[in-house]
Amino acid sequence: MGSSSLNDMEKLIRQRREFIPRGIFNMTPLIISEAKGARVKDITGREYIDFAGGIGVLNVGHCPTELVEAIRDQAGKYTHTCFHLMMHEPYIALAEKLNRIVPGNFPKKTLLANSGAEAVENGVKIARYFTKRPGVIAFDGGYHGRTLLALSLTGKVKPYKLGFGPFAPEVYRIPYAYCYRCPLRIEYPSCDLGCVDYMKEVFRVHAPPQEIAALVVEPVLGEGGIVVPPKGYLEKLRGICSEEGIIFIADEVQTGMGRTGRMFACQHLGLEPDILIMGKSLAGGLPLSAVTGRGDIMDAPHVGGLGGTFSGNPLACRAAMEVIKIIEDNALAPRALEIGRKVVDGFRGFQENYPIIGDVRWLGAMIGLELVRDRKTKEPATKETRQIIKSCCERGLLITRSGTFSNVLRTLMPLVITDEEIDEGLSILDEVLREIRI
Ligand SMILES: Cc1ncc(COP(=O)(O)O)c(C=O)c1O
């Protein structure tokens, strides 16, 4: 595609403002023309290194040839059947594959949906049906999507929940192990994971365990600021769930598909969730999500109780099969660990030079840089984070943010990024950090 002018870009941005609601946030003012691997071009012909990966959707990179071919091939056969009306092989093949690769040494079944939020909703529906209990436990700082129940489970007011209540009932919230800003003001490891014991407070004060169907947890908080819990945390949560018959749902929408150095983050701990939720990178950018879980739980709802018009779209299923093959054939999960090490080396160097960097957290290629105005008070550098993202974009680096204070620079780069591209991105960020004034 040829380059358009700056005027075309400005015109499109004006039209965007006119035709599309302002509530849909835009992190950058860019309009894309094409992308490949970890590089993106806008319609003026400017190139960018991509450290954002469509917010964790492009683990196999932009437009890998095999993926594009698979989608083209499927588009030439049939694009939609509605699985309720007519079954198709790509859905069945993908379910079989996910049942095999999702951790858990027990028979599994898989339901497909369209978005992470929809998959989370289905996971909870199924857990409620199976347990015949109403309650759900979710976490401060957790993020699960924008539909009513997913938003009710989400623990971040601005921009997600503000003004959108009332929320779904029977959601009970506990703190996440955000040790840099421990909500209980205690310290790991002497805290003995007091934040997990908070669950017992819920049982004492809000709802007994016999009324809790599920606990929905991200193995690493993504939107919540790349919060990697300490050793023992998820295992302890899992233990309480097993004791109390609560369905342990791992929301791996952001951590899954090789991002953290294993196909699924739970595998780092040998953790076997009852239900595991996938989305984002699952189909390489086509809308698809999945709920894979213990066969007996997944089979609980009656015939006709689950599904949807587009759920398990054949194009998206073919894409997902190809994505999984690319991750496996190219060892992208181990590559995520290498990427993580390299980027974190760079980030630690920044931390020595720039006082704005309060904390560096990571699991594989899911990396967060928490920015503070003062290392002692930890006052969040929210405004500065916004400025850094803007300046990076102006110099050719796409990077995003997260955190309940929106002060964490977050990298979710494609796992096909080269070392040279990482260096290029890091040197842009270095320049920007050098110039930022608190
Ligand atoms: C952990 C997690 N769960 C669920 C979702 C919601 O996914 P979607 O935006 O596809 O509804 C997200 C999206 O960022 C996520 O990070």
Image (cartoon, rainbow, N blue to C red):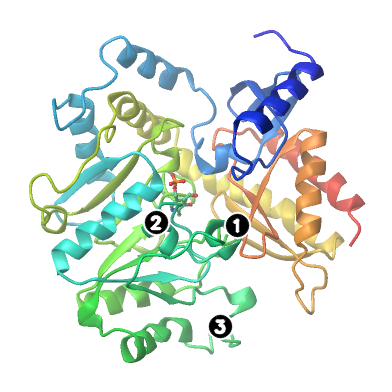
Expressed as whole percent of the image width and height from the top left, the position of residue 276 reads: 31, 54
Which mark, residue 159? 1
Q: Along the polypeptide, which appears first: circle 1 or circle 2?
A: 2
Quote the CA–CA distance across marks 3 and 2: 34 Å
Mark 3, residues whose alpha carbon is within 10 Å: few (<14), some, or many (≥20)? some
Give residue 158's position: percent from left, percent from top. 61, 61
Disc with the residue nearer the chain's start (1 vs 3): 1
Q: Earlier in the sequence, mark 3 or mark 2?
A: 2
Q: Ligand 1: does it lie within 8 Å of the C-beta at label 1?
A: no
Q: Amino acid at mark 2?
A: Leu
Three-letter code, disc 1: Pro
Report the residue that reaches farthest toward the left.
303
Q: On the rendered structure, is 48 left or right of 200?
A: right
Q: Judging from the image, what secondary structure is the residue with disc 3 in?
A: loop
Q: Please name the residue shown 80% across and 19% down the image.
A: 6
* SS label for mark 2: helix
The kind of secondary structure element at disc 1 is helix
The amino acid type of the residue labelled 3 equals Tyr
Q: Name the foreground residue: 368 vs 326.
A: 368
Let me know if residue 263 appears in the view. no
The residue that mark 3 highlights is 188
Q: Give the percent coordinates (x, y) of residue 401.
A: 66, 52
Q: Which mark is residue 148?
A: 2
Q: Quadrant of residue 152?
A: bottom left
> How busy is the neighbourhood of tag 2: few (under 14 within 10 Å), some, or many (20 plus)?
some
- Distance from label 1 to label 2 (Cα)? 15 Å
Q: Are marks 1 and 3 in contact (CB under 8 Å)?
A: no
Q: Would you say the residues marked 1 and 2 are in contact, meaning their CB atoms lie under 8 Å apart?
A: no
Residue at 36 percent across and 90 percent down: it is 205
